[in-house]
Amino acid sequence: MERRCTASSPSVCEACPPGSFTALWNYIGRCLRCSVCARNMVQSRECRRDADCSCECRHGYWYKERAGMCVRWSECGTGHGVTAAGSPQTDIVCSPCVNGTFSDRVSSESGCSAHSVCVAPRSEVLRGTAWHDVICASPYSLLLITNPPALPPDAAHFLRPLLPSFFSHHALSVRRLRHLLGKLPSSDSDSVAKRRRSISRLTQDQLRARLDQWVREAGPAHLRSLPLLLAETGAMFTADRLTHKLGLQKVMEKQVNSASNQNICP
């Protein structure tokens, strides 16, 4: 209000300047300042002279009443997929992957995917689960990875892509992750003590990233040593699960023997 009314003249109002507003009829002498969206919020409507701005949680966040702030959407672990997408007002909903589907990632937006179907001459060497896809291979490709060819194929060659999701599904505590990383064979020239000191400063996500990097670079012999190293850290169940996965060696050897007997050509 620029000037209040008198006995002889009405009130005089003026438009609110940019950055201010009034939403109701009023007698105040100065317009209200437009609000500023809080952390992790974005404007859904700009401030106008007759209305304040509106804010909502930015993508990936939802407003949690109890917290009074925007919080990150939950994450569906491996073996689970998103069945109801998140919004600025609601969290996501996760559900276990049903038979014939899988999810090998931790995600706030991905659902479960259908297992691959092995097409001849490729056949299934590892059955799919809720947290990893089917592994298919042709007898000829199994022969190719043997070195020399007289040796059976190495299961570690096929398991390498599965190991990151394996360690997401069978999550290790920070203490055991540090213990495991301290035991992993390494080509670094750093001493074991120095390597363990650097590991002690890493967060769980950083430890997982370091383990995933080792998996990408490790040779088959080192990958085969993982169950024993896990057992030495006290993660007996995880070691047993990984040993079970390495059991596909027998399936692969059977297929190689069959391929050799049939004299399969590429």
Image (cartoon, helix red, strand yellow):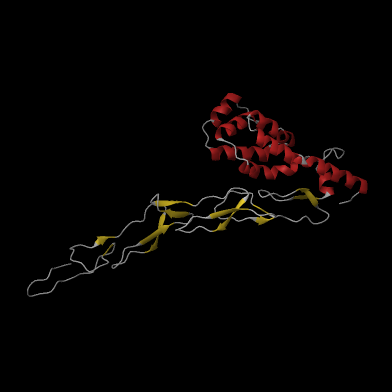
**Residue 185 in view (yes/no):** no
- Quadrant in which the N terminus is drawn: bottom left
Count of all numbered marks drawn on residues in the image: 0
Residue 144 image point, x, y percent: 82, 45
Horizontal side of residue 148 vs 198, given as left or right: right
Give whichever of 31, 71 is nearer the camera.
71
Residue 175 image point, x, y percent: 56, 32
Where 33 falls versus 222 (above or below)? below
Residue visible at 74% across and 34% down?
221
Residue 83 image point, x, y percent: 57, 58
**Residue 93 in view (yes/no):** yes
Residue visible at 70% across and 38% down?
242
Residue 22 image point, x, y percent: 26, 65
Horizontal side of residue 82 vs 57, given as left or right: right
Residue visible at 23% across and 63% down?
31
Horizontal side of residue 28 vs 18, given as left or right: left
Give whichever of 167, 202 is nearer the camera.
167
